[in-house]
């Protein structure tokens, strides 16, 4: 610089030249403009700096726009959507790899995930889309999917993490479930206390470990419970039940499952027998209006 400037200007300029991100560049350029001499002879110089600032801001805005749209691009909501929310390193990507077929990047350094990554949970025929998100605090974190997901799975290492996470849930429309990860790092006493606190605070939380697999199956079951669907098997007399269940909304009836086999099928039913959580005893004879429960088996005798 040819004009006389004070030391503040040079400090800002040095920071500007060493800035690693666009945000930092903008910040220090603003400081340079503030600290630049205000006399007549430097007018042209200051005008140049301001022009540079405008160009930087424009470039930054463009970058932000494309970053945000690329973050969401490819994330099409398919059926029931679950979003993973948490602080850096809590184990979201590890959990995605445990619950789905996805192979995300997992590493011991934080902020490894830089874009939403999808996997499909397929638990006994019930499917859900799971989206692993960049951690809170990441440049790439975007709250959009958290707000619209059917279920936010909050992945934490300690209950105290919830304080930092709660502000990001203020507009979340879906249900919430907490996965308290890394239980393998706790001793018996710590585990006992943790479970006690969860119980006394009535938190919807499950203590899991992606390392030892503790409670991963239980977590899957809890997710399914949040989906408000039931799995019902059908069978023909004298034959074993179907391998894959029929997925129905909760509160579905024997008539609903009959109709799901084939439209009009319920009219052909002479007798239906239910074995499972909704029956008082195995092979209970029921009417078409009998309300089914998850994991029931329905046997149809037709006319
Ligand atoms: N001991 C232990 N370590 C775990 C467990 N789950 C994950 N980790 C480790 O924690 C680190 C972070 O795991 P990630 O799954 O990458 O965490 P993340 O939440 O996706 O983190 P970022 O996306 O990088 O912010 C890795 O070193 C994992 O191996 C667990 O249950 N127990
Ligand atoms: Mg990750």
Image (cartoon, rainbow, N blue to C red):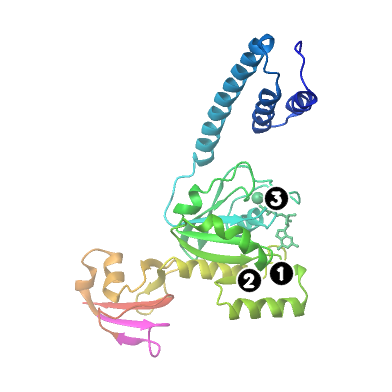
Q: Mark 1: is the Cβ under 8 angstroms from ligand 1?
A: yes
Please tell me which residue is depicted at 75% across the width and 12% down the height of the picture: 3
How far apart, in angstroms, are the residues tagged by discs 2 and 3? 20 Å
Q: Quadrant of residue 177?
A: bottom right
Using the image, determine if residue 45 lies above or below residue 261: above
Q: Magenta stretch: give its range.
A: 271-285
Quarter-wise, where is residue 267 in the image?
bottom left
Q: Position of residue 170 (x, y in %)?
A: 49, 57
State whether label 3 is within 8 Å of ligand 1: yes
The residue that label 3 is drawn on is: 106
In the rendered image, the residue lying farthest to the front is 39
Pointer 2 and pointer 1: residues touching (CB < 8 Å)? yes
Asked whether mark 2 and ligand 1 are closer than 8 Å, the reply comes as: no
**Label 2 to label 1: alpha-carbon separation:** 10 Å
Please tell me whether mark 3 sits on a helix, a strand or a loop. Answer: loop
Comparing 152 with 64, the one in front is 64
* Residue identified by numbered label 1: 183
Q: Quadrant of ligand 1?
A: bottom right
Give how far across and how far down residue 236 sits, in percent: 35, 75
Do labels 2 and 3 touch, CB within 8 Å? no
Which-is-in-front pick, marks 1 and 3? 1
Question: Which quadrant holds the C terminus?
Answer: bottom left
Residue that appears at 50% across and 36% down: 69
Q: Residues within 10 Å of mark 3 (few under 14, many from 20)?
A: some
- Quickly name the residue at label 2: 215
Where residue 155 appears, as percent x and y from the top left, is 62, 61
Q: Residue at x 66, y 10 (%)?
A: 40
Q: Earlier in the sequence, mark 1 or mark 3?
A: 3
């Amino acid at each position: 610089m040819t004009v006389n400037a004070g030391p503040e200007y040079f400090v800002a300029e040095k920071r500007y030249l060493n800035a690693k991100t666009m945000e930092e560049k903008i910040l220090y350029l603003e400081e340079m403009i503030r600290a630049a001499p205000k006399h007549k002879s430097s007018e042209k110089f200051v005008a140049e700096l301001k022009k540079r600032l405008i160009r930087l801001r424009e470039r930054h805005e463009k970058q932000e726009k494309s970053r945000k749209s690329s973050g969401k691009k490819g994330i099409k909501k398919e059926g029931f959507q679950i979003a993973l929310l948490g602080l850096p390193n809590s184990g979201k990507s590890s959990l995605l790899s445990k619950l789905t077929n996805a192979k995300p990047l997992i590493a011991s350094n934080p902020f490894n995930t830089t874009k939403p990554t999808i996997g499909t949970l397929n638990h006994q025929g019930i499917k859900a889309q799971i989206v692993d998100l960049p951690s809170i605090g990441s440049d790439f974190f975007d709250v959009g999917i958290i707000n619209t997901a059917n279920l936010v799975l909050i992945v934490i290492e300690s209950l105290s993490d919830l304080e930092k996470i709660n502000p990001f849930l203020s507009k979340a429309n879906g249900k919430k479930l907490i996965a308290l990860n890394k239980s393998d790092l706790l001793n018996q006493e710590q585990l006992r206390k943790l479970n006690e606190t969860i119980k006394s605070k009535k938190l919807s939380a499950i203590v899991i470990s992606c390392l030892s697999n503790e409670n991963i199956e239980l977590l899957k079951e809890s997710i399914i419970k949040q989906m408000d669907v039931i799995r019902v098997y059908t069978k023909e007399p004298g034959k074993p039940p179907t391998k894959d269940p029929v997925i129905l909304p909760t509160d579905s009836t024997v008539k609903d499952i009959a109709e799901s086999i084939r439209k009009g099928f319920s009219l052909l039913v002479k007798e239906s027998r239910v074995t499972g959580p909704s029956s008082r005893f195995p092979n209970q004879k029921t009417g078409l209006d009998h309300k089914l429960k998850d994991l029931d088996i329905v046997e149809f005798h037709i006319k």
